[in-house]
Image (cartoon, rainbow, N blue to C red):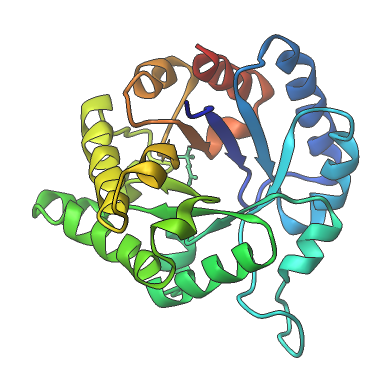
Amino acid sequence: MRKPLVAGNWKMNGTLESITPLVEGIKQGLTSINNVEVLICPSFVYLSNVSDLIEDTSILLGAQNVSQEDEGAFTGEISCNMLKDFDCQYVIIGHSERRSLYGESSELVAEKFIQVQKSGLTPILCVGELLEERESGETEAVIGQQLRAVLDKVGAEGFQQAVIAYEPVWAIGTGLTATPEQAQEVHGFIRDLVAEYESDRTVAEQVRILYGGSVKPDNAKEIFAKQDIDGGLIGGAALKSEDFLGICQAANG
Ligand code: PGA
């Protein structure tokens, strides 16, 4: 049985002033939600504050990116050990904004994935196709390439302690959402691809696959109802406590 995970990716949003009411609002509403793992991924600079704010709650903390290196002369980078100092448990890896705006290749993403696991943190590996790739029938080829870059290195076992997020790039921040059927089709493909790397489907059936891309309280329930969709990676709607809570509620069943 896969426990749903709802992760808020705050991206480069928030201020010292705004994060307290946001987290407090989430905390208050979560008392009635007990069947969902709830994760917040603030900007690096607010990790410490959010860590303090969620102390003694079940809310988990994650980062939006990390270096593939241990430590050293890498100006501007953040290491896994630094994240662990603030009780981070998850790290988003290979978000489409990192891939497209910062040129992160699937090979680099695989290195980061390995580094995150080596440190005892859990990677959330993002994959997704562009609109033109979907329209030209290349969705599975693109997702397959992004996933195999990691699977070829770590095998299915590497996904025992990992989360995958399917985020069609054309649905991120656009208000367009994949239909539940479109999302389920890709989620099923992803699960089958993990299964290709093992002799039975143990890891494939256990790995959580989140959907991301304009998830809102009013569309979350039908998306999460699909058999291979185990929660969501939430951008815009994670910045308002009532919207984020509505999505958590939808995952709670
Ligand atoms: P969105 O972002 O919910 O604003 O579309 C999702 C994401 O990029 O993780």
| Residue 118 position in % (x across, y down) | 64, 68
| Residue 59 position in % (x across, y down) | 74, 32
Q: Is residue 62 visible to the viewer in this orientation of the structure?
A: yes
* Number of dots carrying numbers: 0
| Residue 197 position in % (x across, y down) | 30, 59
Q: Quadrant of residue 187?
A: top left
Q: What residue appears at the point 31 percent right and 65 percent down from the top-left corner?
A: 148
Q: In screen coordinates, is 124 left or right of 197?
A: right
Q: Quadrant of residue 29?
A: top right
Q: Is residue 125 above or below residue 107?
A: above
Q: What residue appears at the point 39 percent right and 19 percent down from the top-left corner?
A: 219
Most extreme residue toward the front is 199
Q: Is residue 102 visible to the viewer in this orientation of the structure?
A: no
Of residues 241 and 251, the one drawn nearer to the viewer in this rendering = 251
Q: Is residue 113 above or below residue 253?
A: below
Q: In screen coordinates, is 72 left or right of 2?
A: right
Q: In screen coordinates, is 193 left or right of 133?
A: right
Of residues 94 and 164, the one drawn nearer to the viewer in this rendering = 164
Q: In screen coordinates, is 218 left or right of 116?
A: left
Most extreme residue toward the bottom is 73
Q: What residue appears at the point 89 percent right and 30 percent down from the top-left corner?
A: 56
Q: Quadrant of residue 228?
A: top left
| Residue 243 position in % (x across, y down) | 58, 21
